[in-house]
Image: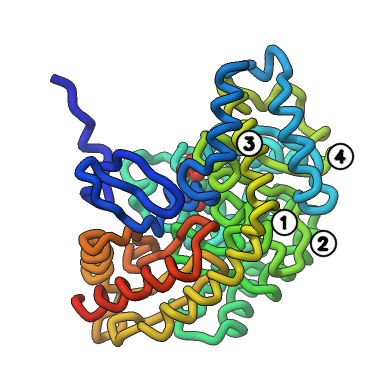
């Protein structure tokens, strides 16, 4: 008899049978309000009819048109559909399957394009589980412990996590930029640095939004030293934060973005976008893979972009996100040291009476919520942040429903 490996850790005891919109149903027909959205993936809701229809149609036409062998129509349609929503000048695209692969594609690109070996990442960042992406991940040793040596050439600078330091946003930003300059003096010379790789909002690292002055500081240094600025938009892209891409809150121009999750409503698809000039500095053929840009995934992505546009999901994410953040603030008890987020990424950080991270209480809250029919996840280096990341189609009634359950949970834990 075969069974699933214990390597897999599951956050809830739920076995899902089917799903629709913002709800999952288990095999006994029990309904759960899904405020995990498959970790920020099913932005158009589960099984959106327009996405399902596009995928069904494509699966009956062409499933796998291997893109280093032949070109296929859904891929060309996806490139066209992305044109209007990509940041200005980032109109050259490459596609893979998962977020980690997109991060690796970005890494290969920036190293080749600059001829420089090193990248600077920011403390608390999560970029994936493949060995190179895990080497760039600093949101918890659980993502890298035990399989060192990791990839070389990765240096870590602070992210302005004001709450953690007990500082104001300004103090945390000054510190982060000063330390970055110090890193350039002591550890990695700027002219050996290919890129900064940074999330607009730390995702797995605890739902910590960056800020305009910090990202402008990165942009200035990038321009001064010929370093490329890579925004990892895998969790923050496609409307999640209330703008199409997360970095757009900060008015800072990226050189490269990575994308995945919300791109194709759950079909595996990821990619990177950069300027044609930058992409052409890398060797043709240096990126690829058997399954990249699967035809059904591409068709689902085109349909996803249509739904995002037609149903006004970016504006909905902004409006519902504001309500959810305010609601989580109002309900916070003494066990919740901080509530923060951007758009439909809302985190509540649990602390004990001394203000130390309280992972047990966060886990208890997450489990209590699941028992009450609300699915949530934890995140953060200490796993003490409970996050709400619903589909972008979430309604005001559903955020109220979630907040009512959240009140009961907080009273219980
Ligand atoms: N980057 C970010 C910002 C992410 O949030 C994630 C996934 N949580 C990844 C990269 C890795 O994506 P994947 O799990 O699809 O490899």
Labels 1, 3: front one: 3
Label disc, if present, on residue 277 of the rendered structure: 4
Compared across the picture, whether 198 is left or right of 3 comes to right
Q: Can you identify the residue that label 1 sits on?
A: 190
**Label 4 crowding class (10 Å Cα cut-off): few <14, some 14-19, many 20+?**
few
- Mark nearer the N terminus (2 vs 3): 3
Give the Cα separation between the discs numbered 4 and 1: 22 Å
Which image quadrant for residue 182? bottom right
Question: Is 325 displayed left or right of 180 in the figure?
Answer: left
Number of the front mark, 4 or 1? 4
User: Could you tell me which residue is drawn at 24 percent across and 86 percent down?
Assistant: 353
Q: Secondary structure at mark 3?
A: helix
Going from N to C along the chain, the mark reached first, 1 or 2, is: 1
Residue 35, how many percent across, how many down? 40, 59
Q: Observer-nearest residue: 36 or 184?
A: 36
Q: Where residue 228 appears, x then y in whole percent?
A: 74, 51
Q: Which disc, if any, is residue 105?
A: 3
Q: Quadrant of residue 61?
A: top right
Quick check: 208 above or below 311?
below
Placement of 156 over or under 47, stated as above or below: below
Of labels 4 and 1, earlier in sequence is: 1
Residue for badge 2: 224
Q: Quadrant of the N terminus?
A: top left
Q: Please tell me which of labels 1 and 3 falls first in the chain.
A: 3
Q: CA distance from mark 1 to mark 3?
A: 22 Å
Residue drawn at (55%, 75%) of the image: 322
Q: Earlier in the sequence, mark 4 or mark 2?
A: 2
């Amino acid at each position: 008899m075969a069974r699933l490996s214990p390597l897999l850790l599951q956050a809830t005891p739920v076995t899902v049978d089917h799903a629709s919109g913002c709800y999952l149903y288990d095999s006994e027909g029990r309904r759960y309000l899904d405020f995990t959205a498959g970790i920020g993936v099913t932005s158009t809701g589960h099984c959106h009819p327009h996405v399902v229809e596009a995928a069904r149609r494509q699966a009956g036409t062409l499933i796998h048109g291997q893109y280093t062998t032949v070109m296929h129509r859904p891929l060309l349609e996806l490139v066209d559909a992305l044109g209007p929503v990509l940041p200005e000048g980032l109109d050259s695209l490459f596609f893979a399957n998962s977020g980690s692969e997109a991060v690796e594609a970005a890494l290969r690109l920036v190293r080749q394009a600059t001829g420089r070996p090193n990248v600077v990442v920011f403390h608390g960042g999560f970029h994936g589980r493949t060995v190179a992406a895990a080497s760039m991940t600093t949101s918890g040793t659980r993502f890298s412990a035990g399989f060192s040596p990791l990839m070389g050439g990765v240096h870590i600078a602070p992210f302005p996590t004001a709450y953690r330091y007990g500082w104001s946003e300004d103090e945390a930003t000054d510190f982060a930029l000063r330390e970055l300059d110090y890193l350039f003096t002591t550890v990695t010379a700027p002219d050996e640095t290919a890129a900064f790789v940074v999330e607009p909002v730390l995702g797995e690292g605890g739902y910590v939004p960056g800020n305009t002055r910090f990202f402008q500081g990165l942009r200035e240094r990038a321009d001064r030293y010929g370093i490329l600025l890579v925004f990892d938009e895998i969790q923050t892209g496609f409307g999640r934060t209330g703008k199409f891409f997360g970095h757009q809150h900060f008015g800072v121009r990226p050189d490269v973005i990575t994308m995945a999750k919300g791109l194709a409503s759950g079909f595996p698809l990821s990619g990177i976008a950069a300027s044609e000039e930058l992409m052409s500095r890398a060797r043709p053929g240096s990126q690829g893979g058997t399954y990249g840009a699967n035809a059904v995934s591409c068709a689902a992505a085109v349909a996803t972009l249509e739904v995002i546009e037609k149903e006004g999901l970016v504006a909905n994410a902004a409006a519902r996100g504001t309500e959810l953040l305010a609601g989580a603030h109002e309900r916070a008890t003494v066990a919740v040291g901080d509530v923060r987020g951007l758009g439909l990424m809302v985190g509540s950080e649990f602390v004990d009476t001394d203000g130390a991270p309280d992972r047990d209480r966060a886990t208890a809250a997450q489990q209590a919520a699941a028992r009450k029919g609300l699915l949530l996840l934890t995140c953060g280096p200490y796993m003490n942040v409970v996050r709400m990341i619903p589909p972008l189609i979430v309604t005001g009634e559903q955020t109220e429903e979630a907040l009512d359950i959240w009140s009961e949970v907080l009273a219980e834990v």
